[in-house]
Every structure is written in structure tokens, then in C-alpha cells.
Image (spheres, grey):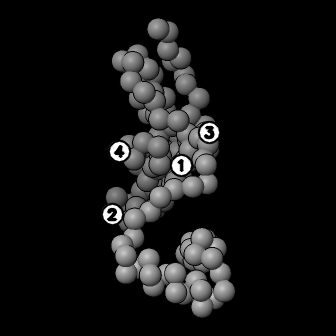
């Protein structure tokens, strides 16, 4: 199996924040939560993390490991199951009815406002 020595990492979900503890910028990637990169500028932090990800992904491919798919490229059904307990379910159903909404509409409105 031939691996790409420079895999495309541009579609992953990145965040660059200031780390007061480290006195540097911290770059993270949602799809690889255990990896991060510190640098003196936001650009350097992002570039450092992307360079590291290219190496990590190439190693994963070489070892036959499954590489996480970017969130942006995943498909979602729009449905998920949530267990909330009987008393909370009852409370939400009552609140939805009082607002003249279905439980689904009520929960969706609350999630959008969060």
C-alpha cells in the first residue's frame, strides 16, 4: 500500500487560541483531540499542527490504521437518540405543550438557542 507523503489536511476542523499558561498560541484539531501545537503566532501554530498531522496521517496509513474523516466530509442523518430520564422527559413534554410546540420543535428551539 503506497501512502501519500503529503496528505491533504486542509479539511480538518482547527482552532487556534491563546494559551496564557504557555504564553503562546495553541492549535488543536477536533478530529485528532490528542494532538496540539504551540507557537508564538497563530499562523505558526496552525502550520505546525498541519505539518504534524501530515506525518501522523502518513504513519497511520502506513500502519494500516483508519484515519479520521474530516467532520466537513461526513454525512449526517439529522437524527440522534438521547436518553434523558423519565422525569426530565415529562418536564420537557409539558413545557413544549405549554408553548404550543411538539416536543421535537421545542427541543430544537432550545438547542439552537444554546
Q: Nearer the viewer, mark 2 or mark 3?
A: 3
Q: At 44% from the left edge and 63% from the top edge, which residue is drawn?
A: 82
The residue that appears at 57% across and 55% down in the rendered structure is 79
What secondary structure is marked by label 4? Answer: loop
Residues tagged 1 and 4 counted as in contact (Cβ below 8 A): no
Q: CA distance from mark 1 to mark 2?
A: 20 Å
CA gap, disc 2 to disc 4?
A: 18 Å
Q: Secondary structure at mark 3?
A: helix
Note whether 9 is above or below 92 in the view shown.
above
Indicate the secondary structure of the residue bearing disc 1. strand
Earlier residue among tags 2 and 3? 2
How far across and how far down the image is residue 14, in percent?
A: 53, 49
Q: Earlier in the sequence, mark 2 or mark 4?
A: 2
User: Which residue does the numbered mark 4 point to in the structure image?
Assistant: 34
**Does the image show residue 113?**
no
Q: Is residue 21 left or right of residue 4?
A: left
Q: Secondary structure at mark 2?
A: loop
What whole-number distance in Å separates the C-alpha atoms at marks 3 and 4?
Answer: 21 Å
Amino acid at each position: 500500500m503506497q501512502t501519500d507523503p503529503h496528505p491533504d489536511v486542509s479539511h480538518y476542523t482547527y482552532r487556534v487560541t491563546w494559551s496564557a499558561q504557555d504564553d503562546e498560541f495553541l492549535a488543536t484539531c477536533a478530529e485528532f483531540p490528542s494532538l496540539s501545537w504551540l507557537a508564538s503566532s497563530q499562523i505558526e501554530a496552525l502550520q505546525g499542527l498541519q505539518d504534524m498531522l501530515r506525518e501522523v496521517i502518513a504513519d497511520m496509513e502506513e500502519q494500516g490504521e483508519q484515519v479520521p474523516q474530516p467532520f466537513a466530509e461526513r454525512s449526517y442523518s439529522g437524527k440522534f437518540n438521547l436518553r434523558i430520564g423519565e422525569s426530565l422527559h415529562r418536564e420537557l413534554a409539558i413545557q413544549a405543550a405549554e408553548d404550543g410546540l411538539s416536543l421535537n420543535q421545542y427541543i430544537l428551539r432550545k438547542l439552537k438557542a444554546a
